[in-house]
Structures are given as structure tokens and as C-alpha cells.
Amino acid sequence: MKKYLSPAAGVVLAAALAGCAWLRPQPGTAEIELVTLNDFHGNIEASKYVLDSAHASGERTIVAGGIDTLGAALQAWRKQDPELLLVGAGDLIGASPAISSMWADEPTIGAMDLLGLRASSVGNHEFDAGRVELLRQQRGGCKSPRADKACKFENPYGGAQFQYLAANVIDMVTKKPLLPAYKIEQAHGVKIGFIGAVLREATEKAPASGIAGLDFVDEADAINRQLPELRKQGVGVFVVLIHQGGRTIDKFDQQECSHLTGPIVDVVKRLDPAIRLVVSGHSHRGYLCRVDGRLVTQSDMGGHVLSRIRLTVDTASNTLRDVSARQEVMIPGSWPANPALDAYLKKVRDLSASALARPVAALAVPSVPREKQDDGESALGDLVTDATLAAGRPYGAQIAFVNNGSLRHDLDTSAGNRVNVSQLLAALPYTNSLVVMNLRGAQIRDLLEQQWHGGRDITRGLLQVSDGFSYVWDRRRGEGGKVLPDSLTLHGVPIENGTSYRVVVNNFLAEGGDAFPAFTLGSNRAETNIRDIDALTDYLTQREQFGKPAGRSETQGRIKRLQQP
């Protein structure tokens, strides 16, 4: 057994020792090994990971992941079990680093194929560019709403070899799932039915125009409906791959976690009793939990962790006798290299290097943090809203709003505080276009109150606002009345309910995304055809030219939370 010299050596060694008897089937049984990942988000390169293990004391920041490391681990595990099955729980693509997003995430799809992925549920980010683009990424071809990116990595693009699954995404015309509801795989003589689903609220996470004509129905009902058909095909072992998740106070690798909370719990409790394993995602939290006797797993995000799951199947009755799992941290150098994945990563880097390394402008600080303060404001949010407002001013814009979900990473810089294309796209990866509209003061008040509807502020945070606009909110007030009525001002002047204000937002918000229907009421709309990333690039460049580089480490106090006495 090899010892790994790394910051997480204790975690890896503990997992290795636990694996010595990993696949020793008892008479009358078959042992199936699954490896799962979720929320990969195009992280084909290794990145920072905060490790907080049940097998070690204290948090530490390490570098983990990367397709080369995942490939090396899977290569080693397949030597132990050539019939190992790799499956996913959605958001493999979307909100990706520039090295993947600049090529329409085609390098990530190709990497998943090389890793041997068999199937994955769709996630909400698979719909970022709409149903047409999702189907292209699955089936191949170059006809894309992102013509500037599609088929630029490889031409022609051949499509994914693995299968996306979506039992609860229904085409309103055909009344059938947009993608297959399930996929049957076979290992060690046993058929396993993988059923895929995505959170029903994905309608709030994707541009409305991109998912028009699709119905996202109840997850548990859609999953349960697949079992009779699977049984007719001789399947007795069922595994759910679902892009919906939860949170727990337990460590990511704590066995038998019993503190899972969140929407996934309700879904799991309503599943058919024959389903005893649920592989989840979306919440970017690792866990190995039990809910009503079922195992519910998630393997963090970004390829930092893979879950290894063992199914013990009674071959006589064709039923699942037992299921267990452990987490494996993907530490570079822990397994012998996989030449195919090493070569593929080098190819992507070589093709991307010159474009991504191009310097854009100098910032005033080494890094503009994405982390939200207690009042809900972030320094990165301040910067991006100001850039958005500057781009919208020729259309009369007075106020800019940006959703937290569009801000993905701190805006870091290189030597001399200079930011390059790669760093910009890491912070703002979606390349949404900007829309300017009129909203009355009363509609802006309603918009702000929608931030807390249904407790959504906990998961999505508050909207970021541009310079000159400010308000005060009180956590103690009830839903619908959290904003102090007289606190809304624009350049110090109170917002009037009946006055019309010119507002600029990205097209995702303009269509009511992130559950902000107030934006759909905006009148006198102007499609600027300006991408948010271009607005940010121009803003940073102009500020440097004027001798006043943009960006701060601290927030500007535009959003204020009333402090309790």
C-alpha cells in the first residue's frame, strides 16, 4: 500500500486502509463499484480546496482536482475493478473557468468522455445557454447560439459519449422527457438503473427564453414513474442521480451523517422504497448521510473530491443488500499518471494559453473579493455593477443590479496588479448580454423585497447594486417589509414610488431569473447587445487610462443592514 506525502496524507491513508477489503464479494453476492462526481463546473485544472476532514484536525487549504488527477485515480481503481462505473449528478459544465468556457465547455465534455463517464443527470447550469445548446453538447454539431465559441476547440464537435438524464424535464409538445429519464448499465452480471433528475426550481436558474416549452416537474414523482419500466427490463437495483442537495454540520467524509437538511431530504423521503442510493449535487457540499435508511451522497464540487460507492447485490433476488461509501480527495501526484488525460490537458492549455494570458488592465488592489459581508454586499459586486452601469449609461441607465450567482470567483491579478482575460472570465464567466428597462420606484421596492421571498437570500444572496443607489434593511422585519421605507435613495435623493427609473441588468435577470419576477415588468426595454464581460473589460481599461484603476478590497456601504441595539 502506497503512502502519499501530502497535506492530506492522513485522509488518503485512512481511505486507502478502508479500501483493502473493498471488493471481496461474499457467496451469492456481487460487488459493484460506483465513482461519482457532481458540480464539476468545467474545472479541468486543479484548484484550491479547503480540506476539513473527519480524519484530521483543523481546516487546511490544499490544491486538488484537475482532469489529470481524476484520470490517474480512475486508472488505478479500474485496475482493481475493470467494471467500475463513473456517473455524475449534474453541473458538469457552466459557470466554468475560462479554459473551458471560452470553448463552449467542449473541452470538459471531452474530458468526461476520456474519464469514462457513463451517465449524469442534467444540472441547472447545463441549461445556461438553453435547451438548443444542451442538445448540441449532447449530440454534437456546430449550430449553436454561441457561434463564437462552438466548434472552435475541435471542428466538428462530435458530442458527448456519456448520456445526460432528465426524468423530470418534460417537453410540453411531446409530453416526453427532453432527454432520457434513465440509463441501464451492467457490471459483474448485474443491471443497474440510473435515473436522472434536476431540481424543480431550475426554472429560476436558467434564462426563461432558453427553456421555453419545458416543464420541470416534481423530482420524486418523475423518478418513481421510471421503476415499472426498469423492472420490465430486468433491473432490480436503482440509483438516483439528482441535481438537488442539502447541507449538514458533519464533515464531508463523516460516515453515517444524520444531520442532513435542505430540499433533497423531502425528495428522498418520497422515493420508492426500492431506491436505496441517492447521488446528489447542487449545494456544493460533501456528505455521506442516511435519510430514512437510504444513503445520500455528494462529493463537493470542482473535481476536488470523488465519492466511491460499493453496492452489494443479492444475485439470487436481484436486489440491493447493502450500500456504503467513502470520499477520496483528489490530490495531484497520489496515483501513477494517466498519459491520455495528461496529454489532453496539455492540448487544452496550449490552445488556450495565448488568449487567456492577454493582459487587460491594472486594478487598484491585488484581489477584489467575491465574499459577501453580513449586509449582503461584496467588493466584486460593487465593481461589476459599476461596470454594468457605465455600459448602460448611453441607454439612460441610472441603476444597475447584478445577481450574486453570476459572480463566481474573486477577481485576482498577476504581477503589478494586472488582470488578464483568464482572471476576468473566472470571476464573470457567463457572458450574458445587458438589457436596459424602466422600473417605477414602487417596482424597485417590490424587487428588493423579492430578495427574501421563501428564504432564497440564504442560498442566492442579495442583489448587488451600483454606485449612488443605497438602502437599509432589517433582518427582524417580516417577509415583504424588510427594506426600511425611507432608506431607498439615488445619489442621496429618496426613490419615489411613482417615478420611473432607468435600470440595467443582465439578460438572465431581465427574464425574471433567480426568482425576480419584478424585472419582467420593466418597460421601454433596450437590448444593448453588450456582454457583461465586455462591459467589465472596457470599464477597467478606461479607469486605468484615466489614472484611477478600479477595484477595492472592501465594500462601499451601498447595502446596509440595520444593527440590532
Image (cartoon, rainbow, N blue to C red):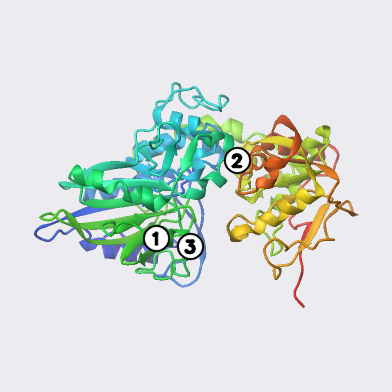
Counting from the top left corner in percent of width and height, residue 405 is at: 61, 49
Q: Amino acid at mark 2?
A: Pro
Indicate left or right for 192 with 95 as reference. left
Q: Are marks 3 and 1 in contact (CB under 8 Å)?
A: no
Crowdedness near tag 2: few (<14), some (14–19) or many (≥20) residues, C-alpha within 10 Å: many
Counting from the top left corner in percent of width and height, residue 58 is at: 50, 71
Gap in Å between the C-alphas at discs 2 and 1? 35 Å
Q: Quadrant of residue 416?
A: top right
Pick the front one: 458 or 533: 458
Gap in Å between the C-alphas at discs 3 and 1? 37 Å
Indicate left or right for 353 with 227 as reference. right
Crowdedness near tag 3: few (<14), some (14–19) or many (≥20) residues, C-alpha within 10 Å: few
Indicate left or right for 467 with 521 as reference. right
Crowdedness near tag 1: few (<14), some (14–19) or many (≥20) residues, C-alpha within 10 Å: few
Q: Which residue is mark 3?
A: 262
Q: Which residue is mark 1?
A: 5
Q: Nearer the viewer, mark 3 or mark 2?
A: 3
Residue at 83% x, 43% y: name it.
501
Q: Is residue 538 above or below residue 67?
A: above
Q: Which residue is mark 2?
A: 429
Q: Secondary structure at mark 2?
A: loop
Q: Amino acid at mark 1?
A: Leu
Pick the front one: 378 or 263: 263
Residue at 83% x, 32% y: name it.
394
Q: Secondary structure at mark 3?
A: loop
